[in-house]
Image (cartoon, rainbow, N blue to C red):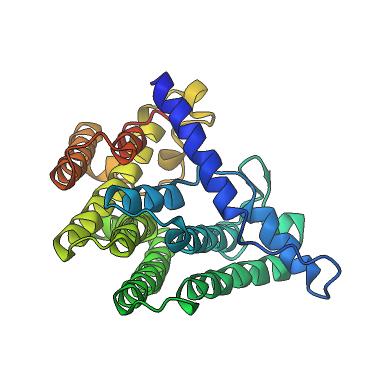
Amino acid sequence: MSDFKEELKNHVEEVEAILGEFIPAQKGAYYERVIEAMRYSFFAGGKRLRPMMMLESYRMFGGKDLSVIKPYMAALEMIHTYSLIHDDLPAMDNDDYRRGRLTNHKQFDEATAILAGDGLLNLAYETVATAMVFEENPAMLNRHAMAIYVLGGKAGVLGMIGGQVVDIEAEKKTDATKEELLFIHENKTAALIQAALTVGAILAGASKDDVVKTEQIGYNVGVAFQIQDDILDKIGDEAVIGKPVGSDEKNEKTTYVSLEGIEKAQEDQKKLSEEAIEMLNKITSEDVFLKALINSLVNRDK
C-alpha cells in the first residue's frame, strides 16, 4: 500500500502540472475577478481522479502523445469543478466549506460564483477545441469529434446534470426508489468517470468493443464508489473518515444501505468492484496503474 501511495502521489503531481497549463491568469483585465474565482476553485486541491483516469486509460490503450490528451484532462476537471461550485450554491446544497476552505460563493459572492462556474464550463469546450485546430489527420479528427461528443453528453442533461436534477427531487421525499437512486449514482457520479475512461480510450484508438467496456467499467466504479459512501456513513470509523457517521440516517436520506440493508449493500458493492477489475483484466493482462487506482477507490475506508 505504501508503494501505491507513493505512486499515486507522483501521478497527482503529474496531473497537477498538466492542469496548470490551461487556466489563464488574467491580471489587470476588467474580468480579473471572475478569473480569480475560477482559479480559486480549480486549484483548491482534490484527488484529480477523473483526469488521472483519463490519462491512464489513454496510456493503457497505447496512447503516447500527451498533447492529444492533455486538453481533455483539463476540460474534464473544469467541468467537474464548475459542477462543485454550482452544487455549493444556496439554491442547491447551500454549503459554506469545501475541501477545508470557504466555498466559492462565500469567498466571493453568489453572482461571481455562478459566473465562475459558467466560465469553467465554457473554457472546457474552448480547451478541447484547441486540440483539433492544427490536426490534419482525418482519423484523428474523427476521434476528437467522438471524444467531444462523449464528454458533452456525459456532462449534460442526459448525464451529470440529469442526475443532479433527480437528486434534488429525491431530497424532497422519503420514499425514493432503488431505481431512482441508481439513476442518480449512474449520472451524477459515474457519468464523468465514464467520460474519463472512454475519452482516453477513444483518443488512443481503442476498438469500439473496448470503448464499450470502459464505459461499463466507469458505471461499475461510479456506483460502487457511491454505495461505499453509504456504507461508510453507516459503519465507518469517524477517526479515519474525518467526519461524523450517521448523517444520512439523521437527515432521513434514502441511501443504498437504507433500501437494501448493510449486508446486501456490501455484497453489491463488492460485485460491482470485482466486475470492473475483471473487465479491465480482459482489456489488458498487464499490471497497469489504472487497476490499482480503481481498487483503491472502491475499497477505500474514507
* Side of 99 where 280 appears, left or right: left
Query: Which quarter of the image is occupied by the N terminus?
Result: top left
Residue 215: image quadrant is bottom left
Find residue 85 and report its horizontal and vertical position in percent.
60, 60
Query: Which quarter of the image is occupied by the C terminus?
Result: top left
Residue at position x 48%, y 29% from top? Answer: 241
Residue at position x 61%, y 56% from top? Answer: 94
In this view, the residue in front, 203 or 98, is: 203
Find residue 15 and report its horizontal and vertical position in percent.
52, 47
Residue at position x 64%, y 62% from top? Answer: 23
Residue 212: image quadrant is bottom left
- In the displayed structure, 105 sits above or below 141; it is above
Find residue 203 and report its horizontal and vertical position in percent.
33, 64
Residue at position x 72%, y 61% from top? Answer: 37
In this view, the residue in front, 177 or 13, is: 13
In this view, the residue in front, 189 or 173, is: 189
* Side of 29 where 284 appears, left or right: left
In this view, the residue in front, 140 or 234, is: 140
* Residue 75 visible in the shown view: yes
Q: How many marks?
A: 0
Residue most extreme to the front? 136
Find residue 30 and report its horizontal and vertical position in percent.
83, 75
* Residue 178 visible in the shown view: no
